[in-house]
Image: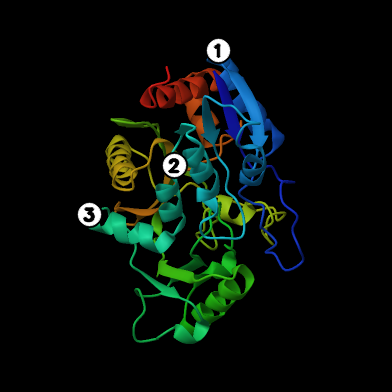
């Protein structure tokens, strides 16, 4: 089969001085695309490198014939950006691995995601959404300080700095102002979970999905923030030499609980084929869901590659297995 590859590389979009400094943080290096192509070839199929949703729009129709597609495009400049490619593929009748447009748009919205996982009885920190700093009501906060503030419609830690953790109302209003003015979107504030560390769980497959070995993330000792949030591409603190520590203990009981919650979130949000769920654990050992990413990176040094190494698997071979499951779901293999 000819399988299209949809992706955004770091040079995919023309940015302006008005765009956030970390506008391209979610995009991929060329090595990720090479890895996707190698996995498709490992399955015996032909990878067709297309690029962004804009590239897909320009090529789709009589000039582009695909049997299926693998989509990891993030898009740009809209809360609907992650839906661009899957909608075009759906309209063209091209089957696509991964979650569909509705799930991608929903999970990009951190507030709606939290509302749905709460309804599914998955613990997540209480939150408030603010469109302006003036909207902050000191008498109706999402919880006691410290709180954590981030953009409503972003991923890959975009918009997160040490100032995202706030200790009083004045700092909360400053953080909301920074998010709303820099990212031109609502800010979401939630109770900051501290004491037991930060963890991420990759999930693959469909009906039933499978939770992979849990990874523990480094935490910066002074702020308590995940190190990845301070070092992401374009962050003002990315080049600083940060120290970190591993807080909490990842024992079998906690891993089982994180697996259960990840699968519940995956299914409640109708994810398919692959995703990554993020959690923090409090001082009492209670895990709290933060967010889920149905467009996780497949970089050869990131979550899925690390998990493959932990399982003693060659990364390309394992990724081919994940994609093969998706093709079988689509009735193509």
> Residue 121 got which mark?
3
Do labels 2 and 3 touch, CB within 8 Å? no
Horizontal side, residue 115 vs residue 278: left or right: left
State the image quarter where residue 220 is shown: bottom right
The residue at the point 49 percent across, 69 percent down is: 149
- On the image, numbered disc 2 is attached to which residue? 276
Instruction: Answer above or below: position of 212 versus 27.
Output: above
Q: Which mark is residue 215?
A: none
Residue 75 in the image: state x and y as whole percent. 60, 50
Q: Position of residue 186 (x, y in %)?
A: 50, 71
Q: Is residue 149 above or below residue 227?
A: below
* Residue 208 x, y percent position in the rendering: 28, 30
At horizontal 56% and vertical 51% (from top left) the residue drawn is: 156
Residue 207 position (above or below residue 294): above
Q: Quadrant of residue 139?
A: bottom left
In the drawing, what numbered circle is on residue 44? 1
Between 212 and 49, the one lying in front of the other is 49
Question: In the rendered structure, which disc, 3 or 1, sits on the residue that comes first in sequence?
Answer: 1
Q: Residue at x 31, y 61 (%)?
A: 115
Q: Nearer the viewer, residue 273 or 254?
A: 273
Q: Is residue 164 left or right of residue 204?
A: right
Element at badge 1?
loop
Please report whichever mark, 2 or 1, sits nearer to the chain's N-terminal start: 1
Mark 2 is surrounded, within 10 Å at the Cα level, by few (under 14), some (14 to 19) or many (20 or more) other residues, namely many
Mark 3–mark 1 contact, CB under 8 Å? no
Q: Does residue 292 show up?
A: no
Q: CA distance from mark 3 to mark 1?
A: 42 Å
2 or 1: mark nearer the eye: 1
Q: CA distance from mark 2 to mark 3?
A: 19 Å
């Amino acid at each position: 089969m000819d399988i299209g590859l949809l992706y955004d590389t770091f040079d995919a979009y023309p940015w302006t001085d008005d765009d956030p400094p970390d506008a391209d943080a979610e995009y991929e290096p060329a090595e990720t695309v090479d890895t996707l192509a190698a996995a498709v070839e490992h399955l015996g199929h032909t990878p067709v490198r297309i690029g962004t949703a804009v590239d897909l729009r320009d090529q789709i129709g009589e000039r582009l014939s695909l049997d299926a597609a693998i989509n990891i495009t993030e898009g740009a400049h809209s809360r609907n950006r992650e839906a661009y490619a899957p909608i075009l593929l759906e309209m063209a009748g091209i089957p696509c691995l991964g979650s569909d447009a509705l799930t991608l748009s929903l999970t990009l919205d951190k507030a709606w995601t939290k509302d749905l996982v709460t309804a599914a009885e998955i613990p997540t920190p209480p939150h408030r959404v603010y469109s302006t700093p003036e909207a902050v009501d000191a008498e109706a906060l999402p919880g006691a300080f410290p709180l954590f503030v981030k953009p409503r419609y972003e991923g890959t830690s975009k918009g997160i700095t040490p100032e995202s953790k706030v200790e009083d109302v004045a700092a909360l209003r400053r953080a909301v102002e920074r998010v709303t003015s820099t990212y031109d979107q609502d800010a979401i504030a939630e109770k900051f979970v501290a004491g037991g560390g930060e963890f991420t769980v990759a999930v693959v497959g469909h009906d039933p999905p499978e939770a992979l070995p849990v990874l523990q993330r480094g935490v910066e000792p002074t702020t308590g923030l995940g190190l990845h949030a301070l070092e992401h591409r374009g962050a003002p603190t990315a080049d600083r030499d940060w120290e970190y520590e591993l807080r909490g203990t990842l024992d079998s009981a906690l891993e089982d609980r994180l697996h259960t919650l990840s699968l519940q979130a995956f299914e409640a949000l109708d994810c398919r084929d692959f995703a990554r769920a993020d959690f923090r654990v409090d001082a009492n050992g209670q895990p709290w869901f933060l967010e889920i990413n149905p467009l996780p990176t497949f970089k050869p040094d990131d979550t899925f590659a690390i998990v493959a190494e932990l399982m003693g698997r060659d990364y390309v071979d394992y990724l081919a297995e994940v994609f093969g499951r998706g093709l079988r779901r689509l009735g193509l293999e």
